[in-house]
Image: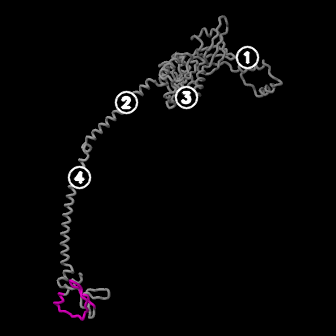
């Protein structure tokens, strides 16, 4: 066994210089170097799933194949047959185990094998604990968040189905879905649903269906089983692939109590494959019944509305204003005539009253007007100066020689002033009356 120390740079440079097309390494050198490199790994713990056990009676070596549950990779394992016979839990194909051993490279055949000295079966408790740890991790990353759930289409034309070949789950989904909606089309991918090859096959089928633009929803279906049987549906790689898919995914794994992690990350969890078929396609009979019911309800609502409107029209027509529309006009006509007569009578009364008042005022004005004064013998004397006329109120306004116009009741007299004469005091007292009358004119 080597010391486990890596080659020094100088040694690597010498080895690179020693190997060339002119100086190739022989097969034995390569085999020895590979054996030395593998030997440096030392003893290791490895976990996997047993897919093959070859235990022949009388042999000193048992041969196993250990496979990675999440990838299409395997490793040859050899051990003492007593490790398998004395295992506290019977080992069989499909068992999850943790082994401890050392890798060896057989230079003669050019193969690698893991020689183990201890095998520990992974019990149910450990599996459940790992699932719980993975569940907590995925929850912390928010992969269970309801906001990430994509809506399931109401009536998908094409449904992708990933399930076991000729399984009861496949039969249930197809039968129930086609009975509910005969026109539905399925793209079926049959894969292993348990065992070491289940996860890689389901991942491949999921990726293929997700790339198909015609597939509108994907159903992941499997019947019930033990925790070990359903372990593939709690695989981390499968859960992350479900979240990363762009197509809505329905998880229908096992029965109602079963709850693998795929149920939590899927867009819709169905209790059983039959329940999944009921939830991805509508029931044609129920939909037709619903259409008939809505049509009947619509017709009943329309008839009720027509009846209500007809009753409203009858009520409107029975009202007096519509039963005899002219009667209201006649009543209004009589009222208008009465109001017109009253208005006319009031207007005539007002006109007569105003006419009487006007006549009285006219008489008063006539009595105090200039014409009445002139009719009583008074005259208005005006001095004419060209086109201007001035009322003579004093002898000073009409000096001798002034041209005068004397207006009397029935006309006017043209005269000339011959002279002026001052009157006495008594005469002067009467004079303002004549002058006032002349001024009002």
Residue with the mark numbered 4: 333
Q: Residue at x 33, y 35 (%)?
A: 306
**Where's residue 213, x and y in %?**
57, 29
Alpha carbon separation for disc pair 3 and 2: 37 Å
Alpha carbon separation for disc pair 1 and 2: 81 Å
Residue with the mark numbered 1: 110
Residue with the mark numbered 3: 247
Q: Residue at x 48, y 24 (%)?
A: 279
Q: Residue at x 55, y 28 (%)?
A: 247
Residue 56 appears in which quarter of the rendering?
top right
Q: Are marks 1 and 2 in contact (CB under 8 Å)?
A: no
Up/down of 290 relative to 427, above or below: above
- Mark nearer the viewer, 1 or 2: 2
Mark with earlier residue (4, 1) = 1
Q: Secondary structure at mark 2?
A: helix
Camera-nearest residue between 416 and 154: 416
| Numbered label tally | 4
**Where's residue 370, x and y in %?**
21, 81
Alpha carbon separation for disc pair 4 and 1: 126 Å
Horizontal arrangement in the rendering, residue 128 relative to residue 407 (left or right): right
């Amino acid at each position: 066994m080597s010391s486990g120390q890596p080659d020094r740079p100088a040694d690597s440079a010498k080895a690179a210089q020693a190997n060339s097309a002119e100086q190739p390494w022989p097969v034995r050198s390569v085999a020895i170097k590979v054996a030395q490199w593998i030997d440096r790994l030392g003893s290791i713990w490895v976990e996997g799933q047993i897919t093959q056990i070859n235990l022949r009676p009388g042999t000193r070596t048992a041969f196993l194949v250990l496979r990675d549950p999440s990838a299409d990779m395997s490793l040859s394992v050899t051990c003492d047959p007593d490790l398998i016979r004395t295992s506290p839990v019977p080992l069989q194909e499909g068992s999850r185990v943790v082994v401890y051993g050392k890798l060896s490279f057989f230079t003669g055949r050019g193969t690698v094998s893991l020689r183990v000295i201890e095998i520990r079966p992974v019990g149910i408790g450990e599996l459940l604990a790992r699932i719980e740890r993975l569940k907590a991790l995925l929850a912390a990353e928010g992969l269970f968040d309801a906001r990430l759930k994509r809506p399931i289409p109401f009536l998908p034309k094409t449904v992708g189905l990933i399930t076991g070949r000729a399984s009861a789950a496949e039969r249930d989904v197809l039968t129930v879905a086609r009975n509910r909606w005969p026109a539905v089309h399925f793209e079926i991918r049959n894969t292993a649903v348990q065992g070491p090859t289940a996860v890689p096959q389901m991942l491949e089928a999921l990726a293929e269906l997700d790339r198909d633009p015609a597939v509108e929803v994907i159903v992941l279906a499997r019947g019930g089983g033990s925790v070990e049987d359903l372990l593939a549906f709690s695989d981390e790689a499968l859960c992350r692939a479900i979240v990363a898919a762009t197509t809505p995914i329905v998880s229908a794994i096992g029965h109602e109590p079963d709850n693998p992690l795929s149920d939590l990350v899927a867009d819709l969890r169905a209790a059983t494959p039959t329940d999944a078929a009921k939830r991805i396609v509508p029931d044609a009979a129920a939909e037709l019944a619903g259409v008939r019911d809505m049509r009947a309800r619509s017709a009943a609502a329309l008839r009720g509305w027509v009846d209500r409107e007809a009753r409203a029209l009858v009520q409107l027509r029975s009202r007096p204003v519509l039963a005899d529309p002219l009667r209201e006009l006649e009543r209004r006509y009589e009222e208008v005539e009465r109001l017109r007569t009253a208005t006319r009578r009031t207007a005539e009364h007002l006109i007569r009253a105003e006419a009487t008042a006007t006549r009285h005022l006219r008489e008063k004005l006539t009595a105090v007007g200039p014409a009445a004064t002139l009719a009583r013998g008074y005259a208005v004397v005006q001095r004419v100066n060209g086109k201007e006329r001035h009322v003579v109120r004093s002898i000073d306004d009409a000096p001798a020689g002034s041209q005068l116009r004397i207006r009397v009741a029935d006309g006017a007299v043209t005269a000339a002033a011959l002279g002026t004469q001052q009157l006495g005091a008594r005469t002067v007292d009467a004079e303002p009356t004549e002058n006032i009358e002349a001024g009002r004119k």
